[in-house]
Image: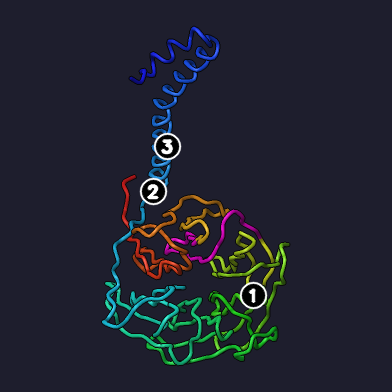
Amino acid sequence: MIARFPDVISRGEHLFPGRIRVFRRQCAALVVCRMIFPIVIGLQLSTSINAADKVSRELGFTLQAQKQFLRLPPGFGLAACSAVAVNKKGEIYLFHRGPRPILCFDSDGKFLRAWGDELIKTAHGLRVDRDDNVWVTDVGSSRVYKFDSNGKPLLSLGTGVAGTGNDQFDEPTDIAFGPKDEVYISDGYGNSRVMKFNQEGTYISSWGTPGVEKGQFHLPHSIIVDGDGRVLVGDRENNRIQVFDGDGKWQATWKGFAPYGMAIDGDGRLFVADSRAGQVLLLDDHGKVKKRWGRQGEGVGQFQSPHMLAFDADGNLFVAEVDGKRLQKFTRKLTKP
């Protein structure tokens, strides 16, 4: 018959009294740790949840993920989703890397129209200007296109050949619009610069070179203009946002995240899609992270490479995922003070 464990310890005390005493103390410590560990984890989780709730109360709202709301027609599917924007009518434009790359839906997710097969090679950035024109960057052809809201081509920038000229791009990534209808383009993967044009596509100026210093970039991946007319550039591989005036003069650098995409809500708050973290971040006025949404995963409210994002007029958030091949909607919900 096999001896019971306590009997073995008891017999061992006669042979190895010192070692058995140490063993008993270790066992007692292990029992205490097993009792305390869940309590500590629970307290940490509770503290984290309470802090998040406090921020939501301060903001006056939170963002709640919805289940899939897009209604695609038969035969339609989504590939890697790279960008999203919403026009004044509440129509949602989704840019993806598959057939019919520019898809348009109404505010309830009903499909309306699609276009782009004859022009777009590889989808990347998409923005809607104040006149509801749709601008896109095509990293496959190194071009930027402007369409009306129904898909009629209005303007094409770039020669179709990657280059460093004032009429060329090298895989441009995103578009932003200034207060006087200036058009800023982050010429990202190849040239590490920002280019400035007018609405007719006439070149005005540019700034930026490869590097890590002020005014230098390592893949300017996203760009947006805030309510003060400042140009915010998501310097992705340098893990920072650089802030410039409208003429490219450096003003500030905000570090600590990978700014794949940026969007500003109706109240002027800056949100960032950090694809490496698998999260959406809310930044304060000094570029510090104030709140986070999501984590890596396939579930609702989780992310697989969140790439770019946008808000509608009601404050609902839309996030395009490259690896997730989907568009997620986060509904704005008011919170009690």
Identity of the amino acid at label 2?
A: Ser
What label sits on residue 194 in the rendered view?
1
Question: Can you tell which quarter of the image residue 265 is in?
Answer: bottom left
Q: Which residue is mark 2?
A: 56
Q: Residue at x 51, y 66 (%)?
A: 261
What kind of residue is marked 3? Answer: Thr
The answer to whether mark 2 and mark 3 are in CB contact below 8 A is no
Residue 26 visible within the image = yes
Query: x and y percent of residue 68 in the render?
Result: 30, 66
Residue 87 in view here:
no
Q: Nearer the viewer, mark 1 or mark 3?
A: 3
Q: Position of residue 64 (x, y in %)?
A: 33, 56
Q: Residue at x 62, y 74 (%)?
A: 189
Question: Of callouts 1 and 3, which one flags the residue occurring earlier in the amino acid sequence?
Answer: 3
User: From which residue to which does the magenta span run?
Assistant: 252-273
The x, y position of residue 105, in whole percent, is: 32, 78
The answer to whether residue 13 is left or right of residue 186 is left
Q: Are marks 1 and 2 in contact (CB under 8 Å)?
A: no
Numbered label attached to residue 47 = 3
The amino acid at mark 1 is Val
Tell me the quadrant of the picture where the C terminus can be found: top left
Gap between marks 1 and 3, in whole Å? 42 Å
Label 3 crowding class (10 Å Cα cut-off): few <14, some 14-19, many 20+?
few
Give yes or no for residue 120 being in the magenta stretch.
Answer: no
Say whether residue 264 is magenta: yes
Q: Please tell me whether residue 86 is drawn above or below residue 317 in the rendered image.
A: below
